[in-house]
Image (spheres, rainbow, N blue to C red):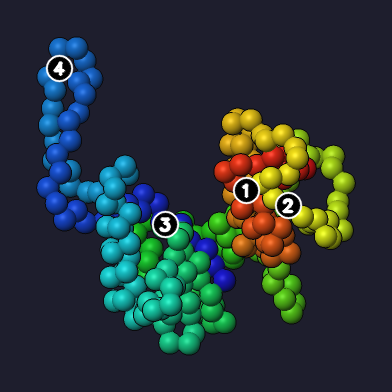
């Protein structure tokens, strides 16, 4: 495996429209200036798309084919796979020479940082062992425990107590508007973990997400 980062990726895209930008004067005596953009800078709504089109054309020229089932995954024959996430590229192949060849080709086209073998993929820790690959989000989970003051909490045998029934009409107080916002933030964070490395908490998280609009103390506990 190999992980690459394209520096200032958006600036490699091509603008399809004429766009002008007003520059604030640096000095009081300087007049306001209007300039024409040559590149899709960060902040333009079309910059991400422009970069994606640029990279797509480059990969196709190298002989890659974009998967119909996932627009961010490319393959070349049966030997090398490239997964794209904005300016991050993750390479998979059993042939290290193919990976090295790809890195050389893309480095000639774009300023590229080679991060070596994949160890962290979008916040997910990747560890390769003799006969298996493990994925974990231990650091992210530790961050959540600190954020929500649960660092000293005890572990539980199951995500939800067996037989527990939850509803919006339970005889307990509803959370304040401020705490409702915190509740929804936590549900979103837990869903992020559940869909990536902890499917065992997915049912409980989905169940609790049903009360995002009206959570009460029982849902919070």
Determine contact: label 4, label 1, CB under 8 Å. no
Determine contact: label 1, label 2, CB under 8 Å. yes
Residue 3 at what x, y percent from top left?
52, 63
Give me the C-alpha separation between circle 4 and circle 1. Answer: 56 Å
Q: Nearer the viewer, residue 174 or 1?
A: 174
Does residue 127 appear left or right of residue 47 in this picture? right
Give me the C-alpha separation between circle 1 and circle 3. Answer: 36 Å
Please identify the residue farthest to the bottom as the structure is shown: 78
Find numbered disc 1 in the image and state the secondary structure of the residue it sits on. Answer: loop
- What residue is rendered at 71% in x and 58% in y? 204
Which numbered circle lies on residue 89?
none
Q: Nearer the viewer, mark 2 or mark 4?
A: 2
Give me the C-alpha separation between circle 3 and circle 4. Answer: 37 Å
Q: Nearer the viewer, mark 1 or mark 3?
A: 1
Find numbered disc 3 in the image and state the secondary structure of the residue it sits on. Answer: loop
Query: What is the quadrant of the C terminus in the image?
Result: top right
Q: Residues within 10 Å of mark 2 (few under 14, many from 20)?
A: few
| Residue highlighted by disc 3 | 87
| Residue highlighted by disc 2 | 166
Q: Nearer the viewer, residue 152 or 205?
A: 205
Give me the C-alpha separation between circle 1 and circle 2. Answer: 9 Å
- What residue is rendered at 12% in x and 47% in y? 18
| Residue highlighted by disc 4 | 30
Query: What is the quadrant of the N terminus in the image?
Result: bottom right
Residue 167 at what x, y percent from top left?
69, 50
| Residue highlighted by disc 1 | 211
In which quadrant of the rendered view does residue 101 lie? bottom left
Precedes in sequence: disc 2 or disc 4? 4
Does residue 149 appear left or right of residue 51 in this picture? right
Q: Nearer the viewer, residue 200 or 217?
A: 217
């Amino acid at each position: 495996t190999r992980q690459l980062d394209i520096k200032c990726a958006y600036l490699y895209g091509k603008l399809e429209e004429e766009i002008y930008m007003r520059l604030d004067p640096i000095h009081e005596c300087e007049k306001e200036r209007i300039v024409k953009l040559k590149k899709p800078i960060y902040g333009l709504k079309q910059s991400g798309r422009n970069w994606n089109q640029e990279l797509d054309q480059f990969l196709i020229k190298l002989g890659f084919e974009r998967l119909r089932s996932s627009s961010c995954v490319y393959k070349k024959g049966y030997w090398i796979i490239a997964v794209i996430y904005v300016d991050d590229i993750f390479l998979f192949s059993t042939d290290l020479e193919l990976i090295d060849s790809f890195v050389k080709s893309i480095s000639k086209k774009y300023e590229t940082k080679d991060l070596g073998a994949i160890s962290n993929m979008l916040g997910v820790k990747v560890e390769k062992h003799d006969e298996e690959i493990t994925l974990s989000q231990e650091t992210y989970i530790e961050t959540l425990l600190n954020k929500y003051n649960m660092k000293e909490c005890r572990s539980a045998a199951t995500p939800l107590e067996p037989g527990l029934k939850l509803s919006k009409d339970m005889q307990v107080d509803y959370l304040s508007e401020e705490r409702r916002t915190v509740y929804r933030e936590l549900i979103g964070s837990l869903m992020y973990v559940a869909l990536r490395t902890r499917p065992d908490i997915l049912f409980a998280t989905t169940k609790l997400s049903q009360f995002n609009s009206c959570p009460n103390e029982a849902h919070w506990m």
